[in-house]
Image (cartoon, grey):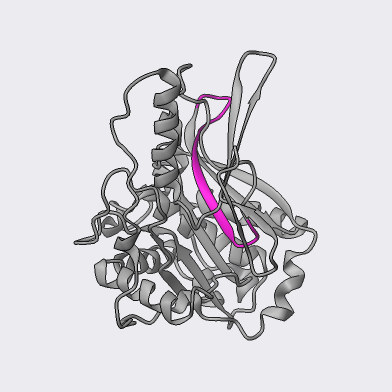
């Protein structure tokens, strides 16, 4: 199903939404959705799919779609009240593009048991950290080590945070649009990799804590100033998104809940990872962390992540000294 098309800067057609259903000989099927992120975020997409599923089951829609795009418009005049380092350009980006060549896409499965073991080794004041925060702290450190980044280089962890329900920025049920912002945690590569896991965790939590109504308005105003021409596409950026609680695994088209719901295997791009909840062949429930790196860097990423998860205590990494 093609909803409509828009064009990018190269005047190539971009579909707003493209959907395909594949039926397997075993009787199962897969529903694939390709979405232009300008139109919706994961929560909005799930709301849309739930309505489609309700129609497929022949039941009445409980939540009707609403437009309300005026709620996410910039102020007049725009007023940028935060320093948005997530959009800072890297003047040396051209020298780092080699890291995006000949890349492979793989996913790492972290069980609930693994994540609980990590949480138990953290100081008491980190015990309430979310699974997303703990997994992201580990993945950020392991990815930085895998890329063998100079210790003095600045690296950023960009959290994908929903503005839905933030203070007075209340979007109504049925709003399908995109309400995501991207606060950044920033560190020198060497400091990040030589510090305890709690260092990365604290940076991530502080970045997320920035997001309130004023922060969201500031982002909208910054986009207005720059006519939407902003990017977080830098090689040393790591963008982490959690789709595990978006509701993909609850969408029922009439044949029961899906075995899997979330992004396809592999990362969305070199610098982006969208986590999904998954049950492996052993029946263990956990989180899938997709990653996109060059082959040797991927090997190092797995090794470093394994060290962080299974070491009694995360200590200094000699490779960064």
Q: Quadrant of the C terminus?
A: bottom right
Residue at 45%, 18% in the rendered image: 254
Q: Report the span colored magenta.
A: 269-283
Residue at 55%, 64% in the rendered image: 238
Q: Is residue 300 visible?
A: no
> In the displayed image of the protein, which residue is found farthest to the top?
26
Would you say 101 lies left or right of 241 here?
right
Would you say 146 lies left or right of 311 here?
right
Q: Nearer the viewer, residue 14 or 44?
A: 14
The answer to which quarter of the image holds residue 252 is: top left
Q: Quadrant of the N terminus?
A: top right
Residue 150: x and y in percent read 64, 79
> In the displayed image of the protein, which residue is found farthest to the left?
168
Residue at 60%, 82% in the rendered image: 90
Residue 12: x and y in percent read 70, 61
**Number of dots carrying numbers:** 0
Residue at 73%, 72% in the rendered image: 97
Q: Is residue 279 magenta?
A: yes
Q: Nearer the viewer, residue 3 or 173?
A: 3
């Amino acid at each position: 199903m093609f909803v409509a098309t828009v064009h990018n800067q190269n005047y190539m057609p971009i579909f707003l939404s493209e959907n395909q259903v594949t039926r397997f000989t075993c009787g199962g099927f897969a529903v694939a959705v390709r979405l232009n992120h300008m139109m919706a975020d994961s929560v909005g997409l799930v709301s849309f799919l739930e309505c489609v599923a309700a129609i497929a089951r022949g039941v009445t829609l409980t939540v009707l779609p609403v437009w309300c795009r005026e709620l996410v418009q910039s102020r007049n005049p725009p007023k940028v009240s935060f320093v948005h380092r997530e959009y800072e350009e890297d003047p040396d980006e051209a020298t780092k593009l080699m890291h995006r060549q000949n890349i492979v896409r793989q996913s790492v499965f972290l069980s609930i048991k693994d994540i609980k073991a990590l949480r138990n080794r953290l100081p008491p004041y980190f015990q309430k950290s979310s699974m997303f925060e703990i997994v992201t702290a580990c993945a950020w450190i392991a990815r930085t080590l895998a890329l063998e980044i100079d210790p003095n280089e600045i690296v950023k962890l960009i959290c994908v945070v929903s503005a839905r329900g933030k203070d007075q920025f209340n979007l109504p049920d049925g709003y399908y649009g995109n309400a995501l912002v991207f606060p950044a945690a920033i560190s020198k590569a060497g400091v990040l990799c030589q510090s305890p896991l709690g260092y990365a965790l604290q940076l991530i939590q502080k970045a997320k804590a920035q997001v309130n109504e004023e922060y969201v308005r500031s982002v909208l105003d910054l986009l207005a100033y720059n006519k939407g021409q902003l990017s977080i596409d830098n090689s040393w950026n790591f963008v982490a998104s959690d789709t595990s609680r978006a509701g993909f695994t609850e969408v029922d088209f009439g044949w029961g809940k899906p075995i899997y719901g979330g992004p396809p295997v592999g990362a969305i791009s070199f610098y982006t990872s969208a986590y999904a909840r998954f049950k492996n062949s052993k029946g263990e429930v956990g989180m899938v962390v997709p990653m996109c790196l060059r082959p040797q860097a991927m090997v190092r990423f797995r090794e470093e992540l394994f060290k962080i998860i299974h070491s009694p205590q995360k200590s200094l990494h000699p490779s960064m000294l």
